Amino acid sequence: MNTAELLVRCLENEGVEYIFGLPGEENLQLLQALKHSSIKFITTRHEQGAAFMADVYGRLTGKAGVCLSTLGPGATNLMTGVADANLDRAPLVAITGQVGTDRMHIESHQYLDLVAMFAPVTKWNKQVVQPSNTAEIVRKAFKLAQNEPPGAVHIDLPENVADMAAMGEPLRVNLPEPSVASIESLDQAAAAIDQATKPMILVGNGAIRNRASDAIRRFATKFGIAVTNTFMGKGVIDYRDARSLWTVGLQQRDYIACAVDESDLIIAIGYDLIEYSPKKWNPQGHLPIVHISPTAAEIDSSYIPTVEVIGDISDALDEISQKMNKAESETIHPQFANLRADMQQNYDQYATDTGFPIKPQKLLYDLRQVLAPEDIVISDVGAHKMWIARHYHCAEPNTCLISNGFASMGIAIPGGIAAKLVHPNRKVVAVTGDGGFMMNCQELETAHRIGTVFVTIIFNDGGYGLIEWKQQSHYQASAFIKFNNPDFVKFAESMNLKGYRIESAADFIPTLKEALAQDVPAVIDCPIDYRENLLFSEHAKALSCPLPSPKP
């Protein structure tokens, strides 16, 4: 047995199902070992796509996704997806090939110090220099990748070490027991919530990772507390629930900003500052905060919790609930209820909109009507992401995945592949702009080859819409954002996919239903009316607080 074979045995021991990546000269031994493994190697068309697939796999399963590249340019291509996983708190293990240790002291073809290069974008990374250390390195990599807060780790395997004889066995996998919050912190949290007259729950991705949705719903329902979620916390509470105030985190003020201003206590559950800076919603640091999370709060002058409850979220909420004296009420504060009614009215007005090109609000309204609660939307990054955050609502956790920590373009199509591998019986839709589509559209060949069938919707505006939005808001003019596109229908057909082009607002729902019924991946080219961006900006500027008084 050589080191590469031992490493693959260790990966099997960790329960790895897939490795996403590209073959190369310096990972030949590892690929050879994988030929005799239960692990399925998925050959991608670009290393960035491989890393994004591992990223989304990790986010959906809680188990580390694994991606593989060779050295040099293969490894540098991998980095964007690795960084995305690390900042989006998705468990990921990246493995790179490397030149032999006998060549590292001199200039060598394609050699880079990959351990130094990956250090800023990982929780931990290590080069295997002794075959006998392989099992320890792999076990530590997976433990760190999956421990809270999860993230990316990196293993570098020199080609001569990969071929060396190796002794040893995979190490036993121990899963840590959830920690329990201190009684003192639970008492303090209960007292703080009891005293508040307008408390609000701000829920983040950590609540999804820790499967705390049921506990949050019980808690909010019992005491009638309004709930808002970050982009990455969608679905923790059903958007149809009367307590749900939908999504916070737009870079401009929106309805929910008024609610935060009016609140006298923020109960931050599984909230990560990287999802939405507290300087946006608590700039003066005046709002009292109860922080409930498996990990301590990050230091920020706008986020200084009154109480920190560190431990398992579900257990903590149930304990706090039992300690509270607040009267039970399923009804949220009347001002918050009126706000929700205004939000619902704004959302519903697009149900019958017939404008063309289609307004982003209308497209997302229709998308929600077609997809079942358990179906999955993967959002790329661009202007459409901001509209998805505001207008695509979720009933279940992990049914709308948005890259928001690193916010990298190009994630949607690779993410769609991973989502379909994890949930083959659910419908999956990748939503992307035309800019993001062209960054990793080559992975649609991968999707077709391995039989992962999903629909890609392109918000087509012939430019970098989010940057134009920013330029127009700042300078009332735009520059350097326009480009030309291929014929996306012919592009899809050239790859043996189904291609569609939307010609009217009425086309969208029947076209989407037909695309979802195909047995090959499908692409829908949809002209989009991004004039709505600036209209929203004007609305945001005009938005005033405090909230209206309760309606009679």
Image (cartoon, helix red, strand yellow):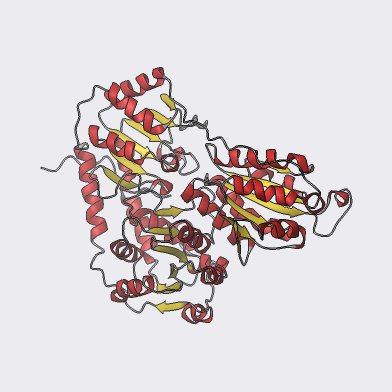
Q: Residue at x 35, y 79 (%)?
A: 503
| Quadrant position of the C terminus in the picture | top left
Q: x, y (%) of residue 323?
A: 29, 21
As rendered, which of 493 and 83 lies closer to the eye?
493
As rendered, which of 191 and 59 lies closer to the eye?
59
Q: x, y (%) of residue 53?
A: 55, 57
Whether residue 325 is visible: yes
Image: 313 above or below 235: above
Q: Quadrant of residue 519?
A: bottom left
Whether residue 286 is visible: no
Image: 515 above or below 273: below
Decide if residue 145 is on the left or right side of residue 182. right
Which residue of the protein is positioned furthest toward the left in this rendering? 552
Decide if residue 212 is on the left or right side of residue 327. right
Image: 264 above or below 350: above
Q: Residue at x 77, y 51 (%)?
A: 162
Q: Residue at x 41, y 24 (%)?
A: 307
> How many discs mark residues in the rendered view?
0
Q: Quadrant of residue 331?
A: top left
Q: x, y (%) of residue 426?
A: 38, 60
Image: 381 above or below 7: below
Q: x, y (%) of residue 539?
A: 32, 55
